[in-house]
Amino acid sequence: MKRRNIFYVTAFFYLINRMAVSYTKSWNFSGIEQLVTAVNNGTGDLSVFLLTLNLAVGAIFIYFLMSKTSNLFLLSDYIIPRSSKAAFYKFTIFEVGKTVLILSALKLLADLAFSIQSTPMEIKWLVFIFSLYVQTFMKWGLIIVLFNMIRVKKSVIYFSCLTLLIFFQFLAYYSQFMSVLTVVSPNYQKHPILLITSKLLILATILYCIFKNKEYEFYGEVKND
């Protein structure tokens, strides 16, 4: 990511966090947690406002992941004939992972700015949420890769991902199992190991689908497949 984009994204995450903590009146980890779960602890109900802010964060991740994968697939006709499909997939996955890590780190930085008064245990949970951001949006990044492999239009990819994001977050309020498909559910602290394991299994499944996919074609000759 360019330095200018890093600055803008960090400022955007900071603004989203500020809006969330102002709305929840929780100027610490609790406010950040309510943003990621989209649940107002004061009422115990799903908040449309927090859900909207949550979607805005997801939209940033999806936008940059789409931009990265689209640029990489534009180079596929150049890269694949000089190496292989497998090598191109590995390079693409590495770049997607790097983008996810950068965005998640910027989100963590913005979260820490509002967690100065938090306890050491709350900071640990904040770092745990950071790891869940990495795993969750790595999954979405790989899904975007799959969409590009079957040449789905960008507008369709973006709309589909955002629709599923908000739908899964809505369902996560009613079922903790849905936290496997979104970042967290309101009860994410009850089964952290199971949550991580489930997300990793989904990642492994998507990776398997990518390397076994035979549909992607490019306009060139394969040197070795």
Image (cartoon, helix red, strand yellow):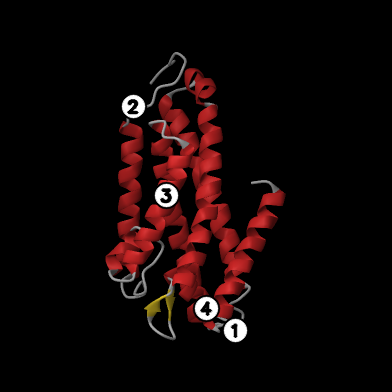
Q: How many marks?
A: 4
- Residue at disc 2, secondary structure: loop
Q: Which residue is mark 3?
A: 161
Mark number, residue 31: 4
Question: Upstream in the sequence, badge 3 or badge 1?
Answer: 1
Q: Is residue 98 visible?
A: no
Which residue shows up at 67% across the image and 62% down it? 11
Q: Is residue 74 above or below residue 19?
A: above
Observer-nearest residue: 120 or 182? 182
Mark 2: which amino acid? Glu
Question: Which quarter of the figure is the C terminus placed in?
Answer: top left
Mark 3 or 2, which is nearer the eye? 3
Query: Looking at this rendering, what residue extends furthest in the bottom direction?
Result: 42
Q: Is residue 179 above or below residue 98?
A: below
Gap between marks 2 and 4 measured at Cα: 45 Å
Asked if marks 3 and 1 touch (Cβ < 8 Å), the reply is no
Mark 4 or 1, which is nearer the eye? 4
Observer-nearest residue: 186 or 105? 186
Which residue shows up at 43% across the image and 38% down it? 145
Gap between marks 3 and 2 measured at Cα: 21 Å
Question: Upstream in the sequence, badge 3 or badge 2?
Answer: 3
Q: Which residue is mark 1?
A: 117
Observer-nearest residue: 85 or 175? 175
Q: Which residue is mark 2?
A: 215
Mark 1: which amino acid? Gln
Question: Upstream in the sequence, badge 2 or badge 1?
Answer: 1
Mark 2 or 1, which is nearer the eye? 2
Question: Upstream in the sequence, badge 4 or badge 1?
Answer: 4
Mark 3: which amino acid? Cys
Residue 147: image location, x then y, percent: 40, 37
Which residue shows up at 51% across the image and 21% down it? 77
